[in-house]
Image: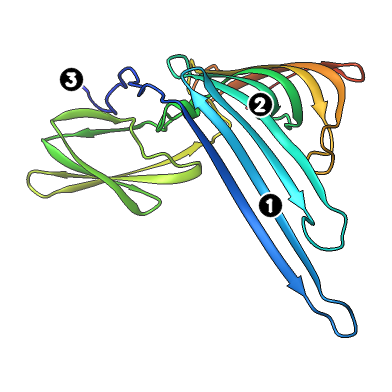
C-alpha cells in the first residue's frame, strides 16, 4: 500500500504588515522610604526609561537608569544600551548596530559589546521549529484511528487509510520521552506501538544553518558604568544541521588578547 505521511502543511511566504512610523516610551518607576529607630528617615526614587522610534527603516531604541533621584544620596543617571535594529523576515536575518550581545551557540557564552552584528534570527518566523522532530512509524491493516500519547498525555487523534504511515508532526518536546501510538481499526481492535524518542534545542534540523558575524568593542560593567568599552574584537559563528542526529559548529574569535578557533558537534 502507498505510505501515508502525517505532516504539517508547508509554510507559505510571510506576509509582513507595512511598518508605520511611531515613537514610544517605556518606564518603570520605584519609590521607597524607610524609618529606622534612632536614625533619620531615608527615601529613594529610581527610574528605568526606554525610548524609541520606528518606521520602515527599522527601530532605534535607547535605555537609561536613574538611581537616588531624590534624597541625600549621590544621584546617578547612566545610559544602558542604544541599538538600531533592522529585520529581514524573508531571509530570517537581523542587522543590529550599537549595544548588543553576541550570538549564543551550543558551546560558547555570549557577552555584551558595541558594534555591528548580522545574524540569523529564527524568531522572525513565529512557530518555526529549528530542532529535529522525532519521526514515528507504524502500519494499519484497515482504515484506522490513531491516538498519539507523548509521555502518557494525549497529543493528537487522526485517521489513516490502510497501509504504512509516518508521523513527523509530533508536538515539540525537548529532551527524551516515550511515544505511544494506539491504532484502532474499524472493528475496534487496538494495536499499541511504543517508541522512545530524543530531541534537544541544541540540535538543528537537517539542512538548517544558524550563523552570526560581529565586529566591535567589548562592553564592560553594563549598568554600572555609563560607557565602558574595552578592546576591539571580531567573531563569527556557524552551526549546521548535518542530519537529524548530528549538528556541527565552528566559531572564530579574534581580539588583541584572544585568538581562538574552535569546532564541535552535538
SS at badge 1? strand
The residue labelled by disc 1 is 47
Image-based side of 158 in relation to 227, left or right: left
Mark 2 secondary-structure assignment:
loop
Residue 192 in the image: state x and y as whole percent: 27, 46
Alpha-carbon neighbours of circle 3 within 10 Å: few (<14), some, or many (≥20)? few
Question: Callout 2: few (<14), some (14-19), or many (20+) C-alpha neighbours within 10 Å?
Answer: many
Crowd around label 1: few <14 · some 14–19 · many ≥20 (10 Å): some
Image spot of residue 198 (x, y percent): 49, 38
- Residue 69, placed above or below residue 22: below
Image position of 107 (left or right of 72): left
Residue 196: x and y in percent read 44, 42
Looking at the picture, does residue 186 appear above or below residue 259? below
Residue ID for mark 3: 2
Residue drawn at x 87%, y 60% as measured from the top left: 73
For residue 103, which numbered disc appears in the image? Answer: 2
Q: Looking at the image, which is closer to me, 68 or 263? A: 68
Tag of residue 9? none
Amino acid at each position: 500500500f502507498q505510505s501515508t505521511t502525517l505532516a504539517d502543511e508547508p509554510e507559505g511566504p510571510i506576509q509582513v504588515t507595512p511598518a508605520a512610523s511611531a515613537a514610544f516610551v517605556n518606564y518603570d518607576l520605584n519609590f521607597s522610604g524607610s524609618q529606622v529607630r534612632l536614625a533619620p528617615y531615608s527615601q529613594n526614587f529610581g527610574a528605568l526609561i526606554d525610548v524609541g522610534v520606528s518606521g520602515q527603516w527599522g527601530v532605534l531604541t535607547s535605555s537609561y537608569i536613574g538611581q537616588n533621584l531624590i534624597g541625600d544620596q549621590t544621584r546617578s543617571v547612566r545610559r544602558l544600551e542604544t541599538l538600531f535594529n533592522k529585520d529581514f523576515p524573508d531571509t530570517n536575518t537581523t542587522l543590529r548596530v550599537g549595544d548588543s550581545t553576541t550570538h549564543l551557540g551550543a558551546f560558547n557564552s555570549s557577552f555584551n559589546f558595541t558594534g555591528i552584528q548580522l545574524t540569523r534570527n529564527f524568531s522572525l518566523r513565529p512557530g518555526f521549529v529549528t530542532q529535529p522532530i522525532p519521526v514515528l512509524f507504524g502500519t494499519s491493516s484497515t482504515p484506522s484511528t490513531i491516538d498519539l500519547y507523548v509521555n502518557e498525555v494525549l497529543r493528537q487523534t487522526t485517521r489513516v487509510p490502510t497501509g504504512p504511515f509516518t508521523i513527523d508532526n509530533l508536538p515539540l518536546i525537548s529532551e527524551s520521552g516515550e511515544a505511544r501510538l494506539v491504532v484502532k481499526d474499524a472493528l475496534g481492535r487496538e494495536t499499541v506501538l511504543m517508541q522512545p524518542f530524543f530531541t534537544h534545542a541544541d540540535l538543528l534540523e537537517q539542512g538548517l544553518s544558524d550563523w552570526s558575524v560581529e565586529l566591535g568593542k567589548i562592553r564592560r560593567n553594563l549598568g554600572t558604568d555609563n560607557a565602558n568599552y574595552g578592546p576591539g574584537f571580531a567573531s563569527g559563528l556557524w552551526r549546521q544541521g548535518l542530519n537529524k542526529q548530528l549538528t556541527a559548529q565552528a566559531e572564530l574569535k579574534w581580539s588583541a588578547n584572544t585568538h581562538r578557533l574552535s569546532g564541535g558537534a552535538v
